[in-house]
Amino acid sequence: MKKIYLLLPIIAGIMFGSTGIFVRTLTENGVDSTTLLFLRFSIAILYIVIAIFLTDKSLFKINKEDIPLFVLCGLCILGLNLCYNSSINTVPLSLAAILLSTAPVFVLVLEYFLFKEKITSIKVLCVILVLIGCTLVTGLLEENSIDISWIGIIAGIGSAVFWAIYSVTSRKSIDMGRHTFTILLYSLITITIVTIPFTSFTQIANFVSLNPVLNIPFLLLHSLVSFALPYIFITISLNHMDAGTAVILSSGEPIAALAFGMIFYLEMPTILMVCGVIITIVALILLSRSSANEA
């Protein structure tokens, strides 16, 4: 049974890595970024509600002092996904994923300034390795580096910054006794309310009308696979292992994105890019282990 729990964060990482397939498919069919996010998160509310019903109905309860943190978490998830979707549509999937995965570096910086947490030599080394790895993945050292979209790179870094802020904020909520499902539910409700005025329901209707039999399940899978199920899997796994182990096991997202990019979009990486992915993942694993040991 324990092996199943070890598999959950690995599967979650692969699912996160598949996000680009859904984003590019919807974008190519005329669905803009805000409408795409409305679809992803409004549908995800249903999945999280089901998860809460199956685990603990008391997780629906919140206090007034929780609301500002939940709103901030929701806005961070919104910013993260807006940036990540932009990155996915302008740079290779592997690069978008590797830039997003640098969030722990920004968490390190935020925790230093906000909580005065110590920055060790190991952490500094990890940051340097991450920078080297990301440089290799971007292809800046390749002859065709001129083809790289700087907007996509900046958007990818932006997604990591938002992810870092969300991580710090959600940790604050967890320290206050709030469950991950509770944080996600009310964050998703915030996002849905914020995105409704900017959502094109005409685009949704047009996409569904193209092929209702295939496209309705596609929208349900988009929300389930790229958001709800990975979070549910990681949350379950955290009940059976330490956070550091869960992070390490789920760190295969860039590798999954690399594989999906090769299979679906013929995004063939160079040797230097593959080395960059490996260096970055190893550095992030060391960083998460270092943080876990200090906790």
Image (cartoon, rainbow, N blue to C red):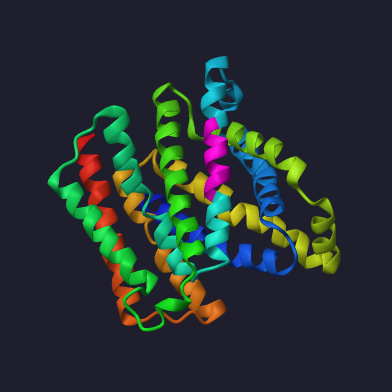
> In the shown orientation, is residue 89 left or right of residue 96?
right
Residue 138: percent from the left, percent from the top? Answer: 38, 70
Q: Quadrant of residue 285?
A: bottom left
Residue ID at (32%, 29%): 114
**Residue 140 relative to residue 42: left or right:** left
Position of 131 relative to 113 (above/below): below
- Coordinates of residue 272 in the picture (x, y in percent): 30, 77
Name the residue at 54% across, 64% down: 88
Residue 236 rendering spot, x and y as whole percentages: 45, 42
Q: Nearer the viewer, residue 108 or 6?
A: 108
Q: Quadrant of the C terminus?
A: top left
| Residue 155 shows up from this direction | yes
**Residue extent of the magenta highlight:** 72-80
Main SS, magenta residues: helix
Q: Is residue 251 above or below residue 146?
A: above
**Residue at left offset 39%, top offset 55%:** 101
Q: Is residue 242 visible?
A: no
Residue 192, quarter of picture: top right
